[in-house]
Amino acid sequence: MTTATAKTAPTARPTAREEDRVAQAGPLRTRVILVTGMSGAGHSSALKALEDMGYEAVDNLPLSLLQSLTRPGTDFARPLAIGIDIRTRGYSAETLIAELARLGERSELDVKLLFLDCDEDVLFRRYTETRRRHPLTADRPVADGVRHERRLVEPVRARADLVVDTTMLTPGDLRRLLQGHFALERQSGMALFVVSFAYRHGVPREADLVFDVRFLDNPHYDPVLRPMTGREGPVAEYIARDPGYKPFFDGLSAVLAPLLPRYVHEGKSYLTIAVGCTGGRHRSVFVAERLAAWLNDLGYPVTLTHRDITRGGEGDPAGGRP
């Protein structure tokens, strides 16, 4: 994980999106994102990503200084991303929630609380691999610290505007998610993230819509096609010949075509569509490629990721069709 540090920069001019907000909603509001969550869940990576997006990133700010840092000035203030966790001086869930409420009462601020979470077994592994001690434990097992921390931060998680589970996310995936939710620059319409995945490795937790394509003919059982992926011509042709593929894709596009504009109308700026098969190399990859191309033709900015394409074969064929 990368580390974000506090930086001082000259006052920035409002972005196009912020100028639009002024025109539509009156006085300009300074965006403030409080970044918190479980230790080891990607706190530093999130701050670094937000910093690269144009936020001034400040980590480990004592809660007693939060109001001072966000005190209004005479000029437009640069958007802030403030890291707060159990290492923060004066931290408690109750204090953080109270400070958040105080910030929310200030009309000049647009405040969001971002909570980063992660499965406990993954957190255990991260601490073991880096040989770091958990902040709440000096001479006890890491597991004790993680479980104690989860109890302490649960009220904050319940209050968060956005919870991101980083268990299966790469730093690049996290950056794209944050870009979708908190980008400062003007975007054309709603940004879409299409991801293929293997059910054997779990459904992507960031997914808004999930489609299961395990009913399609499975190239895994063809010895010639097995080493290939859904991005290669022979596999694509094999799947496309399945009599069930075209009706499925026509139905999928018929559902999404009217649905996406409604999401845009409701103010949703980012949508993740996940397509899964058993092994994450053939059917889900092919369908995700076709879906991303179709969405791009509609004019939506699309980011395509094949999460499990390099993880190997299907192993257990359950859910696949010979």
Image (cartoon, rainbow, N blue to C red):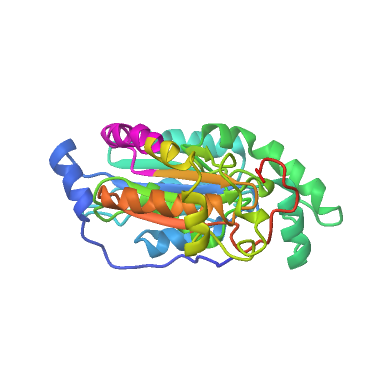
Is 167 left, or right, of 22 in this rendering?
Answer: right
- Rendering coords of residue 78 (x, y %): 30, 57
The residue at the point 34 percent across, 38 percent down is: 268
**Furthest residue in direction left, as rendered:** 23
Q: For the N terminus, which image quadrant?
A: bottom right
Depth check: give the residue in front, 166 or 256: 256
Q: Position of residue 41 (x, y in %)?
A: 62, 53
- Magenta residues span 251-270
Say above or below: 71 vs 44.
above
Q: Nearer the viewer, residue 287 or 73?
A: 287
Number of callouts: 0
Relative to residue 108, is residue 35 drawn left or right? right
Asked if residue 97 lies left or right of residue 151, the reply is left
Residue 5 in sight here: yes
Residue in view at x 22 percent, y 50 percent: 17
Quarter of the view holding residue 96: top right
Residue in the foreground of this view, choosing between 197 and 43: 197
* Residue 317, horizontal then vertical, whole percent: 72, 47
Q: Specify whether residue 41 is painted magenta.
A: no
Q: Main secondary structure of the magenta part?
A: helix
Residue 154: x %, y % from top left? 64, 35
Give the camera-side residue of 29 and 115.
115
- Work out whether residue 116 can be spotted: no
